[in-house]
Amino acid sequence: MKWITRENIKVDRVACPWLIRRFVDPEAQFLFVGESQLLETATREDAIPFDAPRLSEVKLNHRGVRCSFEAIIEDYHLQAPGLERLALIVRAADIKGQEPIAVEGIGLRAIAQGFAAMGISDEE
């Protein structure tokens, strides 16, 4: 299946593809596009959209203080040792103000910012 999200990935859009490939769709292909093109491209490519908080049509999205990583876990009924804890770390890294729930998130955010500063492509 194809999956699609916004370009210029950050923490949640790095964590979600890992989660999808590991637990949902091992053969997943990912597309990264501008937010304004996301819904149209998703329809054209028959791709599942995720992590586009400004687009209410996207089901796998932030939900309150919870991030898209958590939405995927919930909607696909994923259960694995450590997955709930990892979800808290991803949320703490992705959503400002959530750092107290998992201080490891601060380190994960720093790593993600470092990759962005290096200019690594979304596909990498």
Image (spheres, helix red, strand yellow):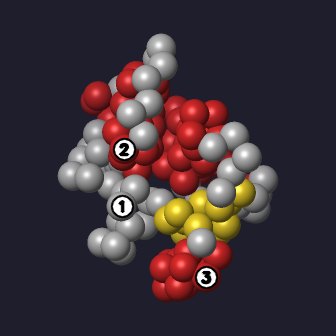
**Which residue does the numbered mark 2 point to in the structure image?**
75
| Mark closest to the chain's N terminus, 1 or 2 | 1
In the rendered view, would you say 54 is above or below 115?
below
| Mark closest to the chain's N terminus, 1 or 3 | 3
Report the residue at 47% width, 14% height from top: 81
Q: CA distance from mark 1 to mark 3?
A: 17 Å
**Do residues under tags 1 and 2 come within 8 Å of each other at their CB atoms?**
yes
- Crowdedness near tag 1: few (<14), some (14–19) or many (≥20) residues, C-alpha within 10 Å: some
The secondary structure type at the circle numbered 2 is: helix
Q: Quadrant of residue 9?
A: bottom right
**Which residue does the numbered mark 1 point to in the structure image?**
59
Q: CA distance from mark 3 to mark 2?
A: 23 Å
Report the residue at 63% width, 43% height from top: 25
The residue type indicated by label 1 comes to Lys
**Which residue does the numbered mark 3 point to in the structure image?**
44
Q: Is residue 79 left or right of residue 64?
A: right
The residue type indicated by label 3 comes to Arg
In the rendered view, would you say 48 is above or below 71?
below
Q: CA distance from mark 1 to mark 2?
A: 9 Å
- Nearer to us in this view, 9 or 19: 19
Task: Report x, y in % for residue 40.
Answer: 53, 85
Quadrant of the frame with the N terminus: bottom right
Q: Quadrant of residue 117?
A: bottom right
> Residue furthest toward the left?
64
Task: Report x, y in % for residue 61.
Answer: 37, 57
Task: Report x, y in % for residue 77.
Answer: 39, 34
